[in-house]
Amino acid sequence: MVCVLGVRFREAGKLHYYEANEEVYGGVRSVIAETVRGIEYGRVVIGPKHVDAHDVVLTSYGLIRPGNETDAQIVSQNKQLAQSAYVRCGERIRFRGLPMKLVECEYTFDCQRVIFYFTADGRVDFRELVKDLAAMFRTRIELRQIGVRDEAKLLGGIGPCGRITCCSSWLGDFVPVSIKMAKDQNLSLNPVKISGLCGRLMCCLKYEHDQYESVLEQIPALGEYVATPRGEAVIVGIDAMQRTVRVRLQGFTEHTVFPVEEVIAIDPEKMPVAP
């Protein structure tokens, strides 16, 4: 068993697990910790909690100390510096005529690094821009190209559902989403209706997909022949959540709905169904 602390360094950012001393970090709401980017201020969202060492992936970096009110003030000041740096960087991008869109800027807690996030259609030669920024800010400069999903996560917004986008409010990691998930849920395949603000398939298509998959495994597929209480039929529709199937009975044109439990798959060769 190991005592861990779950820390986020951004709102809805990736969750990092640190090994922690329960006596020192018990009840702590924020911490100063080492990360791959340097010294960062993070918000404690889990722990201290004792878990099996095989159940979590601990970061190779360590905690420095619990956070305090002064640290929160420093973070607020850094955000103001980042806003100014964003404007100045945008000016240099336009001066250099670079084909890139600046999305966000942030300082690390110790101000030893300034990170600029941008999007672009292809690779961008920003070496001269880095020189300009290094001379301007007198600190380490990092330019990071991100995708459209990461851009939506950083900028946030209101999704088609009317709520704040999941990626910017609570979703720590993106999950793979495929068009098959929309098909399994019998959703419209119109890209406009199943795409989020980023233009990619909505992350929420994944949330209930496991439930749909488990139900669909127990239900004959579309076009399969089944035996029903009213005779043999072919399946023309499935409602996985209601656990019902819509069928066309042999010799009839209208459709009838039956619970899944009342239909049994049969060999299609034994039953020619009239169109």
Image: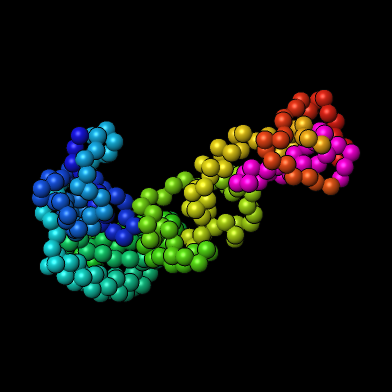
Coordinates of residue 148 in the picture (x, y in percent): 44, 58
Residue at 38% over, 50% down: 173
Main secondary structure of the magenta stretch: strand
Q: Please, is residue 16 above or below residue 135 in the view? A: above
Nearer the observer, 257 or 234: 257
In-image side of 69 versus 223 (left or right):
left
Coordinates of residue 273 in the picture (x, y in percent): 85, 34
Quarter assignment of residue 32: bottom left
Quadrant where the image shows the C terminus: top right
**Residue 192 visible in the picture:** yes
Quarter assignment of residue 130: bottom left
Coordinates of residue 243 in the picture (x, y in percent): 64, 42
Residue at 75% over, 32% down: 226
- Range of magenta residues: 231-253
Residue at 19% over, 37% down: 2
Residue at 21% over, 70% down: 76
Magenta includes 68?
no
In-image side of 136 versus 268 (left or right):
left
